[in-house]
Image (tube, grey):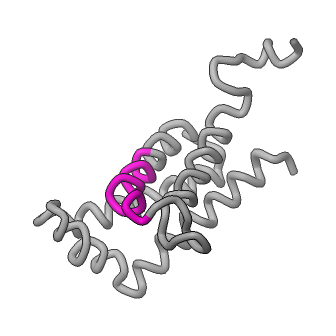
Amino acid sequence: MNGNLLLRIAVAIILLTHSVFGIFDNGINDFGNLYLNQIGFAPFGVFLAWSIKISHIIAAILLLLNKYLKPAGFITIFILLMGIVLVHFKEGWFVVGGGRNGAEYNFLLICVLLTIMFPNGFGKTKSNDKL
């Protein structure tokens, strides 16, 4: 198993678990109603919350299938960046330890998605790999 496959599986598991549990415990509706609507997205908070979670599920499936990685990655990275701006930034850097609910986890996911999307680096082609 190559490293890219392992990363794709790991990120898919993270995106699925982050989304699927919210479907069954009303977390998606709560996020839409109790957070997104409250910070100015009303009346679209629930729609946005469901759109985010459905996009995570679709991205996870595409990662597992190794299809449309760049579009799925760009959409997911946009969502993660918005999560940093709207939710995590005010909590600081650390998820646990030196703080709570910070941006470090989203930052790591963004870096991993970029690695998956650009396995040969930015601007490199496969012919440059031999250099």
Q: Residue 99, how many percent across, how many down?
A: 52, 71
Q: Quadrant of residue 118?
A: top right
Left or right of 68 on screen, residue 51: left
Of residue 111 and residue 48, the one placed in the foreground of this image is 111
Q: Quadrant of residue 124?
A: top right
Q: Residue 121, how many percent across, how many down?
A: 69, 27
Q: Residues in magenta?
A: 78-91
Of residue 55 and residue 130, the one placed in the foreground of this image is 130
Question: Is residue 61 shown in magenta?
Answer: no
Of residue 32 and residue 57, the one placed in the foreground of this image is 32
Q: Residue 70, how many percent across, how many down?
A: 54, 36
Residue occupying the far front of the picture: 98
Q: Is residue 43 above or below residue 8?
A: below
Q: Is residue 116 above or below residue 10?
A: above
Specify the principal SS of the magenta part: helix
Q: Quadrant of residue 4?
A: top right
Of the 4 image quadrants, the one containing the C terminus is top right
Q: How many marks?
A: 0
Q: Is residue 83 above or below residue 35?
A: above
Q: Residue 5, how many percent across, how many down?
A: 76, 49
* Residue located 65% across and 54% down the image: 64
Question: Is residue 79 shown in magenta?
Answer: yes
Q: Is residue 64 above or below residue 66?
A: below
* Residue located 61% across and 52% down the image: 108
Residue occupying the far left of the picture: 43
* Residue located 69% across and 60% down the image: 10
